Image (cartoon, rainbow, N blue to C red):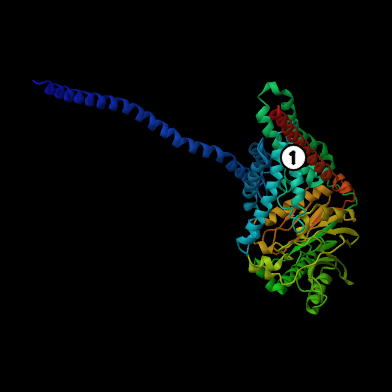
Amino acid sequence: MSSSATRAAGNEAGNDAGNDAGNDAGNDAGNEPRGQAEAEDGVRTQAPVRRWAARSVRPVLAVLSGVLLYLSFPPRPLWWLAPFALALLGWCLYGRRARAGFGLGVLHGLGFLLPLLVWTGEGVGPVPWLALVTLESLLIGLTTLGIALVSRLPGWPLWGAAVWIAGEALRARAPFGGFSWGKLAFGQPDGVFLPLAAVGGTPLLSFAVALCGFGLYEVLIVGADTRRATAALLAATAVAAPLAGALAAAPLVSDAAEDGTVVAAVIQGNVPRAGFDFNAQRRQVLDNHANRTIQLAQDIKLGKVAKPDFVVWPENSSDIDPYTEPDAYGVIDNAVKTIGVPVAIGSVLAPETGPLRNTMILWDPVKGPVDTYDKRKIQPFGERIPMRSFVRLFSSDVDRVRRDFGPGKEPGVFDMAGSGVGMVTCYEAAFDDAVRSTVQAGAQVIAVPSNNATFGRTEMTYQQLAMDRVRAVEHSRTVLVPVTSGVSAVIRPDGEIVQQTKMFTADALVAEIPLRSARTPATRFGPLAEYVLLAVALGGLGWSFARRSARSARSSQGVGA
């Protein structure tokens, strides 16, 4: 064999052997890295899922905390859920940056207010409801932004609860005069913290709930860590202090008859139909209340019930102006003469010029109308339409309010058979100053004439009734709640409902009630408790910013060195 043939055979054999070896080696070497690569790909695929899940935990829990807070509100007797809702919110906010705190607060607000305020869309569709909830949730977001900032401070539940009260104070005043619905205090008419309302009003009651809630979270975090004894003590104090304060305030809650007793009656005449269109049958609404009053007079003659010293009709029980409509005047006058005692009538007055007036009229059986009270807190987008031309772009329902109502200026206390009966008309019950000023003006009894027919069978009437119960304890006064379509009620000064009606049922409640003139600390000192808590909130935020500035300065010095 020639040398060339030998080289060729050798090369060919070498190539085959090399190829075989290379293929085997490549297959063996390639199989193992491919398995590892697939495993790494699987890890890379799972990692974003885990990150997404981790990032979703706080937002989901923020919404859940809002839902729990909603469930704590009447008509459910689950007031004890509120501290746990705030504890869960505290877990979401603790140590977070301001931007995250804002976003989580908005989510909490949506979870809370979307179901709580669904009644605001009754009869007008979802646009007003969603707009109101969005605005209020943004304000709650500002509140939780502040809570996130102070959550890094020692004893942060104190600072966080004070910031929460600052947020409630803002929502009660802005925009358009504020919207107080959803205060923590208004979910506590059956709660253990309720006596604190008599000490510092709704701000102190809300503060107690928030402090207890944030304290609960802090107890869970530091309670098992014996190395943080001081922090554990502060956390336990945050939970125990509101409970101890409520126990100490219990003697302020009394329904004793300081100035004797009177017999009062509230009339629920009912409406032809629910919703905004009930106003189309204004005369029928007036007749319903007049007829139910006349029926009460007949029951008195038959000895079925005691004769009242005075009677209170609901708001809008006569949407026909009796000063300009003789027929309406005659219907009211006949009913009042038949019952034979002073009656407070809810009417709408329509002067020739200027805004309408939502007015309570004191009607004497002999002298006729002798006194009036004009509602001072006028509901925006209900009784008046701010920015009417702009709002019309989103809903034509604004034109249902063809003429705005104007606010009154002075509190109204009617002399009814020698008793001072203070008028707080419907929406006003949500505002601290409106109720307090009425008691300070001499009210021995509070009447909250209301019209809930617009909102059908929603929870709105129960939410408002809860407010009235808190107000009874706050100012130690009996609260009479006459409503056009339910639920009307008689509430004693200790917050207990002693009589109430069913929804959309004509009825009359007659009860002997105590007269009281003593003023609780909440009545006497007014917004002082709220101002103190606002100062605490500002102090906490100031301390937080000072610490952040100091850290930034130290960081800058370190970089320079």
Mark 1 = which residue? 161
Hey, which quadrant is residue 451 in on the image? bottom right
| Left or right: residue 116 compared with residue 421 | left
Give the quadrant of the N terminus. Answer: top left
Q: Residues within 10 Å of mark 1 (few under 14, many from 20)?
A: many
The residue drawn where x is 74% and y is 66% is 384
Work out which quarter of the rendered image holds the C terminus and state it.
top right
Q: Residue furthest front?
A: 3
Q: Nearer the viewer, residue 142 or 3?
A: 3
Would you identify the image quadrant in which residue 101 lies?
top right
Q: Residue at x 72, y 40 (%)?
A: 210
Residue 389 vs 120, above or below: the answer is: below
- Which residue is at the front of the view, 56 or 130? 56
Q: Is residue 183 visible?
A: yes
Give the side of residue 330 with respect to residue 25, left or right. right
Residue 410, percent across and down? 87, 61
Task: Name the residue at 74% across, 27% down.
Answer: 233
Image position of 70 with respect to 308: above or below: above
* Front-most of residues 351 and 266: 351
Q: Tell me where residue 203 appears, x and y as whole percent.
A: 79, 45
Pinpoint residue 435: horizontal percent, then vertical percent: 82, 54
Residue 432 vs 24, above or below: the answer is below
Q: Residue furthest left?
A: 1
Given the image, on which type of amino acid does mark 1 rest?
A: Ala
* Percent x, y of residue 84: 66, 38
Residue nearest the viewer, comparing 346 with 532: 532
Q: Judging from the image, what secondary structure is the residue with disc 1 in? A: helix
